Amino acid sequence: MQRFDRYFQSKMKDPAFKALYEKECHVCAKTVQIFAKVEQDSIPLADLAEATGAAVDALKALKDADYCDPELVIRLCRHLALSSPEDCPRLGKHY
């Protein structure tokens, strides 16, 4: 995971990339961390969906980077005992 973090931080130093990322991002390091933990702990998506009140399709879309739901990311972080993201350009505020 550290390699991705270093790469991401390096890319975010480029103002053009950062602007595009903030406009178009559908996956973030936090989402990657969520699904790494899900895989590490062998949690079936159906079980995660039931535990968090999310639809399995919403979890699949988040995992596949087809759609980002910041509120779902926060809910998943809390459920999995991960730190919530410090900020989110899609949510438009700090939380």
Image (cartoon, grey):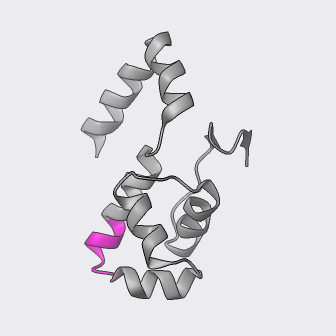
Q: Residue 26, image x and y in percent? A: 46, 44
In the image, 57 versus 1, the foreground residue is 57
Determine whether 92 is above or below 51 in the image: above
Q: Is residue 39 magenta?
A: yes
Determine whether 18 is above or below 77 in the image: above
Residue furthest to the top: 15
Range covered by the magenta-colored residues? 37-43
- Count of marks overlaid on the render: 0
In the image, 23 versus 76, the foreground residue is 23
For image coordinates 44% across by 59% down, the residue present is: 62
Q: Is residue 48 left or right of residue 6?
A: right
Q: Is residue 70 left or right of residue 81?
A: right
Quarter-wise, where is residue 61 in the image? Answer: bottom left
Q: Is residue 34 visible?
A: no
Q: Is residue 29 visible?
A: yes
For image coordinates 58% across by 49% down, the residue present is: 85
Quarter-wise, where is residue 14 in the image? Answer: top left
Determine whether 17 is above or below 43 in the image: above
For image coordinates 40% across by 86% down, the residue present is: 46
Q: Is residue 48 left or right of residue 38?
A: right
Q: Residue 18, image x and y in percent? A: 49, 21
Determine whether 54 is above or below 66 in the image: below
Q: Residue 76, image x and y in percent? A: 53, 68
Q: Residue 28, image x and y in percent? A: 45, 44
Q: Is residue 33 magenta?
A: no
For image coordinates 26% across by 71% down, the residue present is: 40
